[in-house]
Image: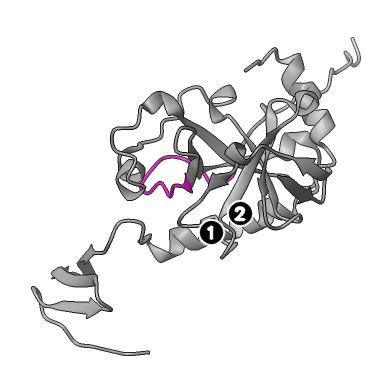
Amino acid sequence: MLVLTRKIGERIKIGDDIVVSVLEISKGTVRLGVEAPKRVPIHRHEVYERIQEENVKAAQGEFADLEAAVQLFRKKGLKE
Amino acid sequence: MIIQTRKFGNIDVAEEKVLTMPVGLAGFPGRKRFVLLEREDSRPFCWFQSADDPNLSLVVMNPFLFKPDYRVELKAAIKEMSWEGDPLADMVVYVVLTVNEGGPYRITANLIGPIVINTRKREAVQLVIYDSPYSLQHPVMEQPPPPHQKAVGG
């Protein structure tokens, strides 16, 4: 891993078109600004990771109970 | 075109039904083409099926059927996807369901990672909603009423 030291207002350039700026540092928190082209997804890592895990879990579900779930929904009278 | 699926075998799907996910689907790198399979006998549940991997399908549904007050801010998605100017009426929101052991009452929906489909552009994106009150595992079914209890004693 590359480790760089930066001060407030300084920036890091990644590749041709991504710039990360240090905006503010206080009490153990750093605020970063990220400039990147559209369609480069930028996420807070831990939240993205949870979505990733949930997607994988969802894809493994066998949905044997789907029939029962369909019945339950119909009983409640929910219709699209 | 023919799409292979593990659940339904080979299915013939019109080319224009294929949705592209330019930034992909979290957890499944490289999978960018999907189709939404709706079957009369499994409503309101639908399948978000990869057009390139028979084994990759997610069960999705319209979140407003079980959470009418669900709100998704589309601004960021519209910008990221360059959907500016496209009518909101062309955008539909689905949430991914997870089946847990223990029957239909244990089905949960991921409300912080909805899939938004632009039906006109035939593109889709999974949003990540930050700082919201929503859950990654929101129960889809209201819990069953407690079993009828017989009067005891008297």
Looking at the image, residue A7 lies above or below residue A72: below
Please tell me how crowded label 2 is: few (under 14), some (14-19), or many (20+) other residues with Cα within 10 Å. Answer: many
On residue A55, which mark appears? 2
Between residue B54 and residue B14, name the one nearer to us.
B14
Name the quarter where the C terminus of chain B is drawn.
Answer: top right
**Residues under numbered marks 2 and 1 in contact, where contact means CB atoms less than 8 Å apart:** yes
Q: Where is residue B12 shown, x and y percent of the image?
A: 76, 40
On residue B80, which mark appears? none
Q: Is residue B89 left or right of residue B32?
A: left
Looking at the image, residue A51 lies above or below residue B87: below
Residue visible at 34% across and 32% down in the picture: B86
The magenta stretch spans which residues?
B125-137
The three-letter code of the residue at mark 2 reads Asn
Q: Is residue A21 left or right of residue A79?
A: left
Outermost top residue: B154
Q: Which residue is mark 1?
A: B26
Is the residue at mark 2 from the same chain as the one at mark 1?
A: no
Residue visible at 75% across and 17% down in the picture: A74
**Which image quadrant for residue A12?**
bottom left
Q: Is residue B60 magenta?
A: no
* Disc 2, SS: helix
Spatial CA span between label 2 and label 1:
7 Å
